[in-house]
Image: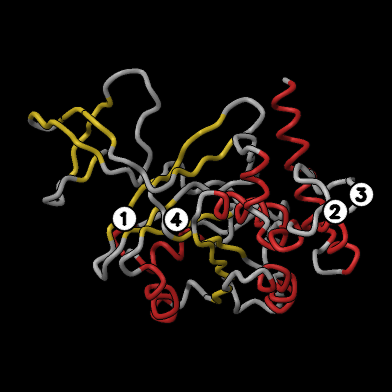
Amino acid sequence: MVQLEDGTVRQCFPRGKKAGPAVGDRVLVAVAGEEGSIERIEERKNLLYRSDEMRTKQFAANVDRLLIVVAPEPEFSDELVGRALVGAWSAGVEPHIVLNKIDLPSAEGARERLKTFRHLGVPVHETDATNVSATRETLLPLLRDRCSLLLGQSAMGKSTILNALVPDARAHTQPHSQALGAGRHTTTTTRLYTLPEGGDLIDSPGFQAFGLHHLEPEDILRGFPEFKEPTSECRFYNCSHRHEPGCGVLAALQRGDITPERHALYERLLAENEARRTY
């Protein structure tokens, strides 16, 4: 579905068999009646992917900011937040974390867990999405004149946030399962909304996994900004920062400048990358 410059929306079909457009792309179209064809995809600033062992899927283009929605209940995954941050930094996208459901008593524990990401320089914004006016006051300044991607695990309250920011979205919401501590996917497609206040907001389906198999080792390294300074101290130019003698990253890890959890994530991503290449 393509939104034309006059604001109308048309169904347009891509030409050829190459990878098609992603949400957020700007395209040249030829329209005839109610339908049209996509003649060309304009040059992209960036392109975000999610991948697994079987396939890589593009899902958003030309993104300025990534808003990762987390909540104290159901408990969010540090691993998935870390992976989303790597995906953002490797693509040159500015990440932000939105802590939702701050009205819950367990919110303080979630704040404590987010300190690791705050120390990396990731801004954390707090919301109770059921308070529409406060949510808009907190988040709309981040979105103005930007293309932002709303991303989060299922049941974090992402659809409630979207409804607060874009009342016409009328996104379906439902409570998470208390028995499973998880939520069902209430969003099934990726869609861009143009904000009356200026800017675009892309909503994506909730996820319970975030593969980065498409990244090259240098992309993965870019996703760990705290490694940048220590790498200048490495003895070997092709250091993998896992086991080499004289590694600046391992020295920083020993000093406590890099957390064991972050370095372990780096090692897992490299191992996944190597397994994909072997396969």
Quadrant of res 53: top right
Q: Specify the amino acid type for callout 3.
A: Pro
How would you rate the neighbour count of disc 2 (Cα within 10 Å): few for under 14, some for 14-19, many for 20 or more?
A: many
Locate residue 54, reporting x and y percent: 63, 25
Counting from the top left corner in percent of width and height, residue 118 is at 66, 73
Sooner in the amino-acid sequence: mark 2 or mark 4: 4
Judge depth for marks 1 and 2 and give the one in front: 2
Q: Which residue is mark 3?
A: 245
Q: Residue at x 74, y 70 (%)?
A: 113
Asked whether disc 2 touches disc 3, contact meaning CB atoms under 8 Å apart, the reply is yes
Whichever of callouts 1 and 2 sits on the residue coming sooner in the sequence is 1
Question: Of the residues shown, which amino acid type is indicated by label 4?
Answer: Leu
Q: Name the residue located 39 percent from the left edge and 55 percent from the top edge.
A: 171
Direction from residue 240 to residue 83 in the image, left or right: left
Q: Which mark is residue 149?
A: 4
Q: Nearer the viewer, residue 234 or 210?
A: 234
**Colour scheme in use:** secondary structure
Q: CA distance from mark 2 to mark 3?
A: 6 Å
Q: Amino acid at mark 1?
A: Tyr
Q: Which residue is mark 2?
A: 247
Q: Is the C terminus in the top left, top right, bottom left or bottom right quadrant?
A: top right
Alpha carbon of mark 2 to alpha carbon of mark 4: how far? 36 Å
Q: Point out residue 208 in the picture as x, y percentages from the top left corner.
A: 64, 46
Q: Is residue 126 above or below residue 196?
A: below
Q: Which residue is mark 1?
A: 193
Q: Secondary structure at mark 4?
A: strand
Label 1: element kind: strand
Q: CA distance from mark 3 to mark 1?
A: 51 Å
